[in-house]
Image (spheres, rainbow, N blue to C red):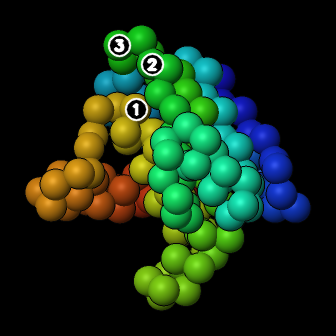
């Protein structure tokens, strides 16, 4: 089950479509959906999580906590809507596509993809693009 929670004024339009897409992302990587929670928040909310749990004193667009059991994916994905908006401007992409990128990014980590090295980052970016394209396929 994919759940959406809001700690900011932002609300997804058509949660059902996003939930269906996220499930498709997971199954396209030969994994299964357990309980995945997306928590949309602002910079300060995510910054506090970054400090409290990861001891990182910086702003980020996403923090994910992975509770998966093998290929059955469970976890909490926190997304700063403010960072997504800023990143969309920086990278000259639509807010919607940048949001999809970040949402997919968290799921891809749960599926086993990493992004610490340059080669891992390239693979992650290619996978993100592949998953964004899935959202834009007519249902």
Q: Which residue is mark 1?
A: 110
Pointers 1 and 3 in contact (C-beta within 8 Å): no
Does 122 sit above or below residue 106?
below
Foreground of the two, 110 or 19: 110
Q: Residue at x 47, y 60 (%)?
A: 101
Dot 3 and dot 2 residues touching (CB under 8 Å): yes
Residue 70's mark? 3
Circle 2 crowding by C-alpha within 10 Å: few under 14, some 14–19, many from 20: some
- For label 2, the residue is 68
List x then y, in percent, for residue 83: 60, 70
Residue 35 lies in quadrant:
top right
Is residue 115 in view?
Answer: yes
* Proximity of marks 1 and 2: CB atoms separated by less than 8 Å: yes
Residue at the spot 52% in from the left edge and 77% down from the top edge: 87
- The CA distance from mark 1 to mark 3 is 10 Å
Alpha carbons under labels 1 and 2: distance apart: 7 Å
Circle 3: is it few (<14), some (14-19), or many (20+) Cα within 10 Å?
few
Residue 10 is situated, as x and y percent measured from the top left of the image, at: 81, 61
The tag earlier along the polypeptide, 1 or 2, is 2
Give the percent coordinates (x, y) of residue 129.
35, 61
Q: Which mark is residue 66?
A: none
The reply to whether residue 139 is in sight is: no
């Amino acid at each position: 089950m994919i759940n959406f929670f809001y700690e900011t004024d932002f609300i997804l339009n058509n949660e059902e479509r996003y939930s269906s897409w996220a499930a498709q992302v997971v199954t396209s990587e030969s994994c299964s959906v357990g309980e995945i929670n997306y928590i949309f928040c602002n910079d300060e909310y995510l910054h506090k999580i970054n400090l409290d749990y990861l001891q990182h004193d910086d702003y980020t667009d996403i923090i994910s906590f992975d509770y998966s059991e093998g290929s059955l994916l469970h976890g909490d994905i926190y997304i700063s809507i403010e960072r997504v908006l800023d990143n969309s401007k920086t990278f000259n992409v639509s807010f919607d596509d940048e949001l999809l990128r970040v949402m997919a990014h968290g799921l891809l980590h749960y599926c086993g993809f990493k992004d610490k090295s340059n080669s891992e980052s390239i693979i992650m970016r290619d996978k993100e693009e592949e998953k964004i394209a899935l959202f834009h396929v007519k249902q």
